[in-house]
Image (cartoon, coloured by chain):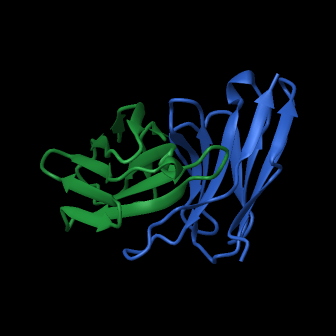
Amino acid sequence: GENVEQHPSTLSVQEGDSAVIKCTYSDSASNYFPWYKQELGKRPQLIIDIRSNVGEKKDQRIAVTLNKTAKHFSLHITETQPEDSAVYFCASAHTGGFKTIFGAGTRLFVKA
Amino acid sequence: NAGVTQTPKFQVLKTGQSMTLQCAQDMNHNSMYWYRQDPGMGLRLIYYSASEGTTDKGEVPNGYNVSRLNKREFSLRLESAAPSQTSVYFCASSELTWGDREQYFGPGTRLTVT
């Protein structure tokens, strides 16, 4: 079935360093790849997304890259800050369907 | 706008008891979803409703039923709760257009089954 694998499960970085989270998807029809951030005790919220017609998208300190051939996509956070500490979920979907498949999540710790 | 609301926030059940989790959205979205979140397993889809009047099974539907009461409301029912259903449950809604596929989540319900 459809599957999204996410690595690493836990990531600890020093404040100011970069963090990279990687995901792999299985469904070749997927063409929409969102990233959600979930702070402790809160609901997941969309932080950035990318569609299959582009290879990279940036929003301030956050960037996503997509390699459709390899079925890989990644989240890059630069100049990390303590408030970036959270669980991050990657996901995949295709615009013809109704379901979004989520990865297992990455717990990011940013040490001050 | 309240967005997506869920009740209750917390619930403790004994094995075999039943309960219904309520969800409502005020964004006029067509699609609604129920997920469960367990440590290390991400968000797993239980059931979804693509539009008013339709419901479909997701990845982990066993032990649950749903009702799309109207466009705003989508409820999740546990007929006979089991300890394996201890989890945090999130409802979500989405418009699902090319330009907007964001899922908007409710605050969650933390359910413990003893």
The answer to whether B13 appears left or right of B41 in the picture is right
Residue in view at x 30 percent, y 59 percent: A63
When the figure is inspected, residue A57 is found, relative to residue A15, above or below; the finding is below
User: Which quadrant would the N terminus of chain A be assigned to in this image?
Assistant: top left
The answer to whether A105 appears left or right of B17 in the picture is left
Query: Where residue A50 sits: x, y (%)?
Result: 30, 63
Residue in view at x 63 percent, y 69 percent: B52
Of residues B27 and B73, the one nearer the viewer is B27
The answer to which quarter of the image holds residue A47 is bottom left
Is any atom of residue B18 visible in this view?
no
When the figure is inspected, residue B84 is found, relative to residue A76, above or below; the finding is above
Of residues A35 and B56, the one nearer the viewer is A35
* Residue at the extreme left: A69
Q: How many marks?
A: 0
Colour applied to chain A: green
Of residues B57 and A36, the one nearer the viewer is A36
* Residue at the extreme front: A112
Is any atom of residue B1 visible in this view?
yes
Query: Where residue A25 sits: x, y (%)?
Result: 29, 43
Query: Where residue B89 sits: x, y (%)?
Result: 67, 44
The answer to which quarter of the image holds residue B60 is top right
Colour applied to chain B: blue
The answer to which quarter of the image holds residue A10 is top left
Residue in view at x 49 percent, y 41 percent: A112
Query: Where residue A6 sits: x, y (%)?
Result: 35, 37
Residue in view at x 57 percent, y 71 percent: B30
